[in-house]
Amino acid sequence: MKTNKAAKELLERYLLGVKRELSGKERADITAEIESYLYDVLAERYAEDHETTEKEMEAVLMEMGSPRKVAAQYRPQRALIGSRIFPVYSLVMRIVVAVVIGAVTLSFIISSIVGQPANAGLNVLEWLGSIWSGALSAFGMVTIVFAIIERKSEERALEEIEDLQTLNISDLPQLPEEQKEVNRIGKSSEVLLGIIGLTFFTYMRGSSGYVPLRSALDNQVHMLPFLTGSFVRLIPFILVLTGLDLARNITLLVQNRHTALTNWWHIGTECANGVLLGFLISSLPLFTLEGLNEVLGLENVLHIQSIANSGMAIALGLGIASSVVDVIKEIVRELKHPTI
Amino acid sequence: MINTKQNEEFEKLQQELRRGVIVLAVMSQLHSEQYGYSLIASLNEKGFEVGQDTLYPLLRRLEQQGLLESEWRIEDPRPRRYYKLNETGREMLERLKQEWSAQETIIRRLLDENE
């Protein structure tokens, strides 16, 4: 039984949806069993050499029902709120608590702007206290209302609940990039670039930042200064970080999937990259073209050198900003939806 | 004449009735090991209809109660979880079978009284 890419992605989105509805250490095991069952259903319906399409997968998933419905079967029966109305209770609770927190925060902002200036620390404490008491009241009220509904509507089918049982494909969560397969061409290119980078910086460290150049004036090869001494001192750190990134890319190519280890590895190297870029900025200028004047008889090299170093300063600044954004995004994503 | 409302009521009572015996039906099929889908197919084939939404949580519960053993195995070509009764499960099944027979006799007698 084969499955095409779109069908496989749809299944993975569905399973991710189920996993998010479950809690506890058994959720990976439960999801794996549901996946196994779905493949058994497909194997029963289609020939062995048939490739499952997205439509066929969708049909099977529709029969299963929404991830919320599937996950609800595994939850223990709650004494106060039964599993039948628990999905609605959970949804309403999230909305009400979010609205209460939003309203309290908005009123805090407005009163801070138009009100009397006071101690900022006390204001924040008051805001946190209001959020706590507001959320607690909302939690209590919603729970009481649903406990009453649970008792009163035991025999009545609620339309809202029926809606939540039906699978709506557009409601399924998107797969985080890291859970998709590794882009082998992209990673191979990064490995190649990493090897070129390692070779280049190893050479530059050995030559103390000098490069060979044949002179047009005397047809002799001269060693000309290219990188400044302050840049050369940072090369060992560049080599370590390039090596770590290269090792990560090779690991990804070998295992063909992102894992928690490779993601945190990436976060670590991105943090270190940001620090290194900061050191590089503080070490400007990084390039020197003074030798070109003597060997090639080029004029205005100092002007070109100044432009190159200014361009490098801008590029390093952008690099730091990009690293910071990347690290924050990755950490938030990894904490919210840990890669398994 | 049975109307829609009565049909719905019947279905609910039927579900309640079946809920009471599903444990017995499932345990009766687990003397030899089975994975979820094969167990559903086996029960359905023998006239006892059960869906995955009922079966899998039940299997998990029976395992937590110490009546079943399960094992993941990679076979042809994907992993499947196999379930089987353990010694405690077999003893429990024997007791449940006796209880079922006793209840069946009683219910039969009660129903026959009215015919």
Image (tube, rainbow, N blue to C red):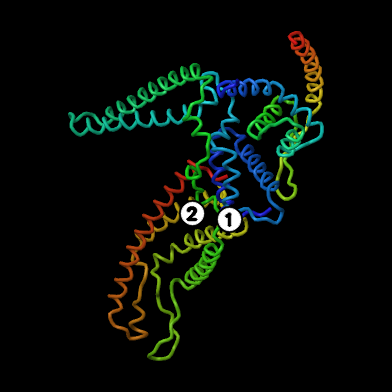
Please state if A117 lies on the left or on the right of B108 as rendered.
Answer: left
Residue B105's label in the rendered image is none
In x, y percent, where is residue B13? 63, 20
Find numbered disc 1 in the image and state the secondary structure of the residue it sits on: helix
Q: Are marks 1 and 2 on the same chain?
A: yes
Residue A269's label in the rendered image is 2
Badge 1, how many Cα within 10 Å: few under 14, some, many 20+? Answer: few
Which quarter of the picture shows residue B114? top right
Name the quadrant of the N terminus of chain B: top right
Q: Nearer the viewer, mark 1 or mark 2?
A: 1
Question: Residue reaching furthest top?
Answer: B113
Question: Residue reaching furthest bottom?
Answer: A218
Up-down relation of residue B57 to residue A330 (above or below)? above
Residue at the spot x=36%, y=81% of the render? A292
Residue at the spot x=44%, y=44% of the render? A332
Up-down relation of residue A229 to residue B13 (above or below)? below
Q: Chain of mark 1?
A: A
Residue at the spot x=61%, y=40% of the render? A31
Find numbered disc 2 in the image and state the secondary structure of the residue it sits on: helix
- Amino acid beneath label 2: Thr
Name the quadrant of the C terminus of chain B: top right
Please state if A185 lies on the left or on the right of B60 as rendered.
Answer: left
In x, y percent, where is residue B43? 74, 33
Residue labelled with disc 1: A5
In x, y percent, where is residue B81? 71, 39
Frontmost residue, B115 versus A266: B115
Frontmost residue, A150 versus A173: A150
Up-down relation of residue A5 to residue A293 (above or below)? above
